[in-house]
Amino acid sequence: MAVSPPTRASRSEFSVDRYAYDHRSPVRWVLSHLGRYKGLVASFLGAALLTNVLVSAVPRLTGLAFDEVLRGDPSARRLLLLAAAILGAVLVRGAVDLVNSFSIETLGQRLERDARDELYVSLLGKSQTFHNRQRVGDLMARANGDVRQLNPMMNPGVALITEALFGLVVPLVFIAFLDPRLLLAPLLFVVAFALALRHYLRQLSPVSAAMRTAFGTMNAGLNETITGIEVVKGTAQEAQEKAKFARHASAYRDAFVAQGRVQARYLPLLLLGVALTGAFAHGLVLLSRAQLTTGELVAYMGLMGALRFPAFISIFTFSLVQLGLAGAARILELIREETELDENALGYSAPMRGEIVFDGVSFAYEAGERPSLRNVSFRAAPGATVAIVGQTGSGKSTLTKLINRAYDVTAGRILIDGVDVRAWQLGALRSQVSVIEQDVFLFSRTIAENIAFGLGERATKPAVVAAAKAAQAHDFIMGFTDGYDTVIGERGVTLSGGQRQRLAIARALLTDPRILILDDATSAVDSATEDAIQRAIDRVLEGRTTLLITHRLSQIRRADLIVLLHQGEVVDQGTHEALLARSRLYRRLFARYDDEPACAPHGAARVERG
């Protein structure tokens, strides 16, 4: 049955139903996130506007009080009402500030949460090829540092900028009602402020981007050093790594210094001083001509003083917004990057029988480079054991990674039960294919959680214990003080190689896969450990289609089919006896394997990509 692979505008290996965000630009992306919370946005904007109206009302009320006092016979009742109005404006402003702060703080927290969730799901949905290109430290810097930067971008960044915008507009409206002629000085200031701010932002934007990039580079270097600390210490290269980190930290510091230089040349505060002087002079002229009262002049200068807040806070609030947008751009860079595979949510899904057919399969890791596999064809019957043999670099591991679509074929096709693997629903495909590799990855969690990883919360404790017993792991697990609740170190560093392998086998057993791939699963252990692992593997193989990469002659001999690879091509296939009789290359490989000790070190040291 042939089914065409899916085509979608946005490809992903894993996705969940979610709000549709706009990925066209960082600003659009942030706004689309905020668009989910229209009520909070409206309450924030309304509170910010009302706050500035109340702030501007105080100077106007103060000016009225001055005029009342300067009258020959001031009215105590009127002065009391003005004082009460000022007090009321202050109290109401305090209450409105609470609404303002709650709304913007909630928006900031939700933006950070939703952005982190979107990025995490996006990373889960990226292909293996994508992750091969990434530096883990830089990914963590984006997932933590850049996402975290979105919160201060909103509060205090966007919060203060919004208040500053209203803080420019509302006083101008009050001044216009006071006397339109008084708008001359503040309008000139606003125009000069806008031009200076535009120049400031143009200088600040590349510096902010450089800061986030430098932070990512520094974090990536630190991650690599800590991950490879055993190599660093084993080769006594601590000084070299310290010097490398110092260079990266210096680059990050230099970006901060560059930001400080840009901020030091910020002009609006100086412009405001000039504007205040001009406004006061203009007001005095109108006062001397009896075209303005003393109270109106006091109100005017109070309103001009309110313009100091926008000028002052813009020096750091815009840098917070620029840093946030620079972080958003780095997050979007990951989210928007195309992935080669798709989960094919509507694809074929059924219990597997386990038939595998390679039909003229070719594969290259990158377009234009020499293929790692060329025109590979063979068939594995359901329940059969197929041994993949060949020299190092012949493409054995690459071949097995195509079955569960860690990578997709470049040409040809792979069929499972007669269905192209690209037509399978990806979750249904991978849940029935288990891979046990030489380099077993274990999480820094309990032993029980590691064994149950393939089933998650569906795994029961009795099932976990039964899988461990079948994998010959139960005895050593119970040797730990906490048994199955023992927390192992990251990547299983607190366990021996044989113990890690048996936990991996238990994990595979628990998921009950129909297809099992064993990639040099016993090449790095001693003979005694291998015997225990082999008994576990024999238990796993029962009733399952198995692809076996191994240097163990006992395992190769027992295979139903042996596929011989050489430089990415199948040069022969058949039973052990048939290949031994007709293939010179196989006899040479067989003789080399036969001469190697059971714990051959080459297996532990080899890293095979092709």
Image (tube, rainbow, N blue to C red):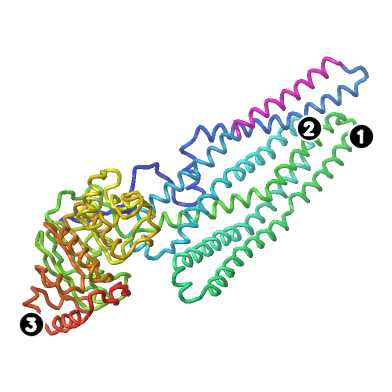
Range of residues picked out in magenta:
75-100
The residues bearing labels 1 and 3 have C-alpha atoms spaced at a distance of: 116 Å
Instruction: Specify few, some or many for label 2: CA neighbours under 10 Å numbering under 14, 14-19, or 20 or more.
Output: few
SS at circle 3: helix
10 Å crowding of disc 1: few (<14), some (14-19), many (20+): few
Task: Please provide percent x and percent y for residue 2.
Answer: 14, 57
Q: Secondary structure at mark 1?
A: helix
Mark 2–mark 3 Cα distance, whole angstroms, equals 105 Å
* Side of 93 relative to 365 (left or right): right
Query: Which residue is label 1 attached to?
Result: 288
Which quadrant of the figure contains the C terminus?
A: bottom left
**Of pointers 1 and 2, the one earlier in the residue sequence:** 2
Asked which quadrant contains residue 211, the reply is bottom right
Residue type, mark 2 in image: Asp
Residue 505 x/y as whole percent: 24, 58
Which kind of residue does numbered mark 1 sit on? Answer: Ser
Image mark for residue 582: 3
- Tell which circle, 1 or 3, labels the residue nearer the N-terminal end: 1
- For the point 52% across and 49% down, the residue is 27
Q: Name the mark on residue 2.
A: none
State the predominant SS element of the stretch in magenta.
helix
Disc 1/disc 2 C-alpha distance (Å): 15 Å
Q: Which residue is mark 2?
A: 179
